[in-house]
Amino acid sequence: MLTSGGTESNNWALRCAGHTKNTISSSGDLPIAVCSAVEHNSVLECVKFSHNGVVIPVDEYGRISIPALSEVLEHNKVRIVSVQHCNNELGSIQDIPEIADIVHAAGALFHVDAVQSFGKWKWDVDDLGADLVSISAHKIHGPMGVGALWIKPDTPIFPFMLGGGQELERRSGTLAVPCIVGFGKAAEMSWTNIDNNSKLQKEMLNGLASDLNVRHGITRNGINLAPHIASMNLPAEASMIAAILNQKFGICLSTGSACETRSQKSHVLEAIGMSLAEQQRVLRVSISRFTTARHISMLRSSIDMALREEDARKLF
C-alpha cells in the first residue's frame, strides 16, 4: 500500500494492524503494542500512545533483548511487535527472522521498519518473516513524501484514512502519481548492482573506521553493521568537529539521526548505556552508492585536520 512515507507507514502498522471486533478480550484488557528502545520515534510514540505499550531494552550494540521480549510475550496479550531491520543511528542489523519466529509463536503480528535497509543491501520480504514492512522513497534518492507499507495477505488491519476508497479502500486520498513514479524508478535504480554497491560501501566505511582508530583511537558503535552507516566515538565534541567539517570542507555529517531535531540527547545512544557526555562525542557517518573512494579519502583527511584544529583551539 502506498503512503506518504515511513512515518505514515509505521503509524498505520502500529495503530491499525491486528484490530478486529474481538480486540477487547473477555477480561476487558486491550492487546498491547511492543517495540525495542532504539526504534524510530514514529514507532516509539505509537507504542507509548497505545494502551499499556511496552518498550523492550537493548544490549550495548542496540540489539533487542530476546529474553525480555519473550517474557513480555509470555505474560501479556500482545497485538503487535515492531523492530527495525537496521538502526538509523548505529547501523546495527537485528536478527529479524529469529524475532519473527518468537513473535508469531506467541500469536502476535510482527512489523519491521525497513526504511533504513530498503535498497541498501539485498533482502527479500519473505525471508524477513514479517506481517508488515515499512519502506520510504527518499532514503533511496527518490522523492520525499512517498513510501509504502507492505502487508502480508490476510493480515488484519483497519484502514488508516477513510474517503474515496483508494488503495483497495485501505488508504483513501488522491495518489501523488509523480512521486510514486519517482519512487518506482528510485527502487529500480537502487537494486541495480546492489550486491556490488553494498560491498563497496561496507569496504569504504570499514576502511575509514580502521584508519581513524589507528590515527586517533576512534571506535565504532554497533554490531553486525549495515554497509552505509558508521557511528563513531570521537576524542572531541562531535558537534564542534561536525561544524568544522561543514564550514571549512563542505562535508555534512550529523551527531545523531537526521529525524531527531528537538534535543541533543539521543534515545538510541541512551538505550545502549551511553551517558550524555559520551553521546556528545558520537559522530554519525552515512554514505550511499554515489560515494566514492575519493570522497572517503577527503573525509579521512578532513577529520584529521578538524581534530587537530579542535586540539589547537583547546590550548587557548
Image: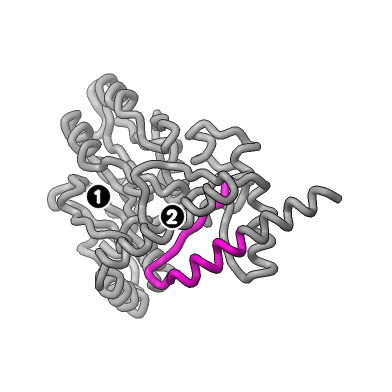
Mark 1: secondary structure: strand
Please name the colour scheme applied to the rendered image.
one colour
**Considering only order in the chain, which callout, 2 or 1, is on the residue closer to the N terminus?**
1
Q: Which amino acid type is marked by label 1? A: Leu
Q: Which amino acid type is marked by label 2? A: Ile
Q: Residue at x 30, y 78 (%)?
A: 181
Disc assigned to residue 229: 2
**In this rendering, does residue 190 appear at all?**
yes
Please check the rendered image and state whether residue 255 is part of the magenta-colored stretch, yes or no. Answer: no
Quadrant of the rendered image containing residue 30: top left
Q: CA distance from mark 1 to mark 2?
A: 24 Å
Disc assigned to residue 287: none
Quadrant the N terminus occupies: bottom left
CB within 8 Å, label 1 to label 2:
no
Q: Residue at x 38, y 72 (%)?
A: 142
**In this rendering, does residue 15 appear at all?**
no
Mark 2: secondary structure: strand
Task: Tell which residue pokes out farthest to the front in this image.
Answer: 214
Q: Residue at x 31, y 55 (%)?
A: 134
Where residue 241 appears, as percent x and y from the top left, is 66, 56
Q: Which residues are magenta?
A: 282-303
Q: Is residue 97 left or right of residue 262?
A: left
Q: Is residue 50 left or right of residue 280?
A: left
Q: Relative to 217, is 165 above or below?
A: below
Q: Relative to 18, is 149 above or below?
A: below
Quadrant of the rendered image containing residue 180: bottom left
Disc assigned to residue 132: 1
